[in-house]
Image: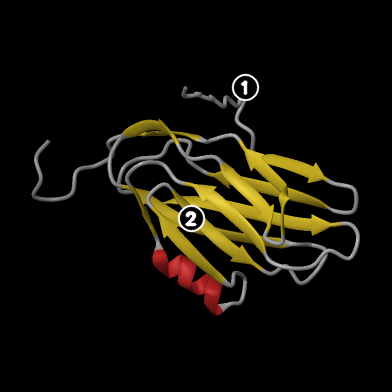
Amino acid sequence: MSTTAEVYVPWGDRPQEKATQTSKDAGLDFSYVCGAAGGAAGRPIECTVEARRFGSQAYGMLLATAGLPPGADVDRASLGKLIDEGTIARYELEPDRIVFYLWPWNAEGMHFTFRFTPRYAIHAKAAPAKLEDYYNPDLNVVLAPQTYSVSAGAQPPGLTP
């Protein structure tokens, strides 16, 4: 006998850009926003991540996952700069998301930006964004997937549509 289980998360009609999760002793604030309004293929889109842990004497690494739309070329130079400045410890780039490894040293948390460039016109949702305490994965915040509407933009020289 086999059993099938389905999981459904109702995201609602409105995009969610910020959320807070609390537990008995600590909590997380998380925000992930990309300036995708009026986006066009070949033009960079800037994204902002804000992550903060609060309460108790909580300390340790946070994992911030930022969803990406299909066909996104992430500006690795902007990610390298974040590592060089000590803003992030490291990152893992996957086809539909970036996972940032964060060590927040103060109560204000982390605030940083990165860029990606859409390769082609799309209307799609990205993967959900998530912030979790590495040592306490039950303490996490999940944001609804962001929808990207990217127009075709200008064709590079030498290409015909």
Q: Secondary structure at mark 1?
A: loop
Q: As displayed, is residue 40 above or below residue 46?
A: above
Spatial CA span between label 2 and label 1:
24 Å
x, y percent for residue 148:
44, 35
Element type where label 2 sits in the image:
strand
Residue at left 52%, top 36%?
146
| Closest to the observer, 109 or 93 | 93
Quadrant of the rendered image containing residue 63:
bottom right
Using the image as rendered, state which of residue 46 and residue 157 is in the foreground.
46
User: Which residue in the structure is indicated by mark 1?
Assistant: 12
- x%, y% of residue 84? 53, 79
Tell me where residue 92 appears, x and y as whole percent.
47, 62
Residue type beneath disc 2: Ile
- Classify the position of the C terminus by image quarter: top left
Q: Residues within 10 Å of mark 1 (few under 14, many from 20)?
A: few
| Other-residue count near label 2 (Cα within 10 Å), few / some / many at <14 / 14–19 / ≥20 | some
Q: Give the residue type that dot 1 points to.
A: Gly
Q: Is residue 63 left or right of residue 29?
A: left
Residue under the point 90% across and 53% down = 25
Residue tagged 2 = 98
**Would you identify the image quadrant in which residue 143 lies?**
top right
Q: Nearer the viewer, residue 102 or 117?
A: 102
Looking at the image, is mark 2 or mark 1 earlier in the sequence?
1
